Amino acid sequence: MTGSVIHGGWVFPQLSSFVPGRLCTRYAAIATANARRSFGRRKSYLFTTNCVNNVAAVTVASDHNYGNKQVISITPRVYDYLLSNVREPSVGSSWFFPTGLYDTLNTSKERDSSALQVLRELREETATMHGSQMQVSPDQAQLLAMLVQILGAKRCIEVGVYTGYSSLAVALVLPDSGILVACERDKNSLEVAKKYYDRAGVSHKVDVRHGLAADTLNSMIENGEGCSYDFAFVDAEKRMYQDYFELLLKLVRAGGLIVIDNVLWHGKVADPLVNDKKTESIRSFNRALMEDERVSISMVCLLAKRT
């Protein structure tokens, strides 16, 4: 397979300031691009749940072909429990490193503790900023870092950095020779990200690109970097998703992984009464991806909070 793509919608509450409120599931999807040969007919799966308040509920899938599968509605109590079992990524969690690399990276308990503190402080500072809902939560960052670890990724791309929480989590688990190209158009939020890259000691692993992501990706292709990246995460302008996807397919190698955020867009894509440009763009992207034989996809359900 040429690569994997996870496309989905991820927005999470802050670990330090979670307040019970209205919760709903959103989606991430995973796709694997086919390595120029057929593995038979592709099967696609889609599971849905409903937004709920503080009352526990179980929904049964309406399609009996799925075996009357029960889907739990995540309540604030359940999500609190989930967050209590999250470990924010640290340098020492990079279990896939080759023998001897730990010595080079000086992955002592003290350094792990310092990295966790930097992640926590970045998360807390971002929570006070305008647009803080764009920051990923510890459970999402943990998942992204784990995907990078499982893949054994060394070269990564992030489209849409904001203040850098997800990119910092990824950079921490990259080997010392690894690189993350961080694309962000907002200079102010990027300055916050750079500050925390420095504090965490990963600045040498993050190639910050200020400007329009499409321009950056095109320049990387023109520079001969095609098929040289292992992993990419997209959380940026929704109306550009198809463009980002096409560019990343040229940059991510066979067997690589692309993660795409917000494909359910707060549930709007499932509401026929909602037809704004962003929602329509995401609907169009989802339809195109379902029919794209270059990739195999998986849509993963993740949790969001609405206050």
Image (cartoon, grey):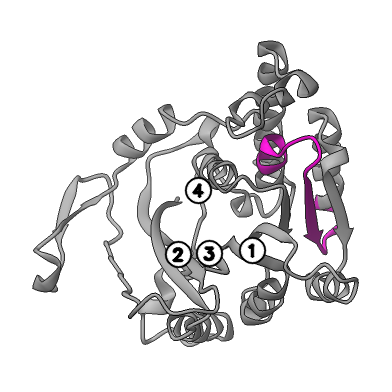
From the image, tell me which residue sits under label 4: 12
Please rate how many residues cluster around mark 4, counting C-alpha atoms within 10 Å: few if below 14, some from 14 to 19, many from 20.
Answer: many
Secondary structure under badge 1? strand
* Residue 54 x, y percent position in the rendering: 26, 44
* Residue 176 x, y percent position in the rendering: 79, 35
Rounded to the nearest angstrom, the CA distance separating label 1 from label 4 is 16 Å
From the image, tell me which residue sits under label 2: 29
Secondary structure under badge 3? strand
Secondary structure under badge 4? loop
Mark 3 vs 1, N-terminal side: 3
Please rate how many residues cluster around mark 1, counting C-alpha atoms within 10 Å: few if below 14, some from 14 to 19, many from 20.
Answer: many
Establish if 91 lies above or below 285.
Answer: above
Secondary structure under badge 2? strand
Mark 1 vs 2, N-terminal side: 2
Q: Amino acid at mark 1?
A: Val
Q: Amino acid at mark 2?
A: Ala
Mark toward the viewer: 3 or 4: 3
Mark 2 vs 3, N-terminal side: 3
Residue at the spot 82% in from the left edge and 46% down from the top edge: 206
Mark toward the viewer: 1 or 4: 1
Residue 4 badge: 3
* Residue 130 x, y percent position in the rendering: 70, 52
Does 111 sit left or right of 287 as displayed?
right
Does 121 sit left or right of 52 as displayed?
right
* Residue 205 x, y percent position in the rendering: 82, 42
Read off the magenta span: 169-189
Tell me the quarter of the picture where residue 126 sits.
Answer: top right
From the image, tell me which residue sits under label 1: 234
